[in-house]
Amino acid sequence: MDYKKLTEEQLEEARTAILIEKERRANLAQIPAAIQELAVKYTDGGGDREALIKAVGEQGRPEG
């Protein structure tokens, strides 16, 4: 993409799209470790593992 040929509005749209994509990628990299850390805290604190699994559900959506 030749950024020199873009209007200010197009350039801002591209910048916003890039920032959104960078945030998405960062989330994908960080969330699994964060979930694992929270799951350990939950179960170490006496939380029920099956309740935790149910809360996460299939594809990250709570069941029920």
Image: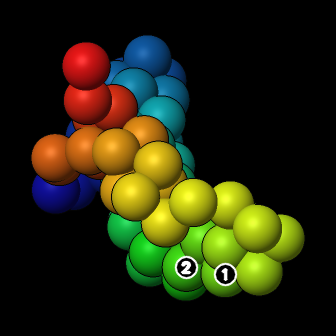
Image quadrant containing the C terminus: top left
* Distance from the alpha carbon under mark 1 to that under mark 2: 6 Å
Mark 1 or mark 2, which is nearer to you? 1
Quarter location, residue 33: bottom right
Q: Residue 61 appears at what percent x and percent y?
A: 28, 34
Residue of label 2 = 36
Answer left or right for 38 relative to 41. left
Q: Is residue 57 above or below residue 30?
A: above
Q: Is residue 32 above or below residue 14?
A: below
Q: Amino acid at mark 2?
A: Gln
Q: Amino acid at mark 1?
A: Val
Residue of label 1 = 40
Residue in the image at 67% along x and 73% along y: 43
Disc 1 to disc 2: CB gap under 8 Å: yes
Q: Residue 19 appears at what percent x and percent y?
A: 50, 49
Residue in the image at 16% along x and 56% along y: 1
Q: Residue 58 appears at what percent x and percent y?
A: 16, 46
Answer left or right for 53 relative to 19. left
Residue in the image at 76% along x and 68% along y: 46
Image mark for residue 57: none
Q: Is residue 21 above or below residue 36?
A: above
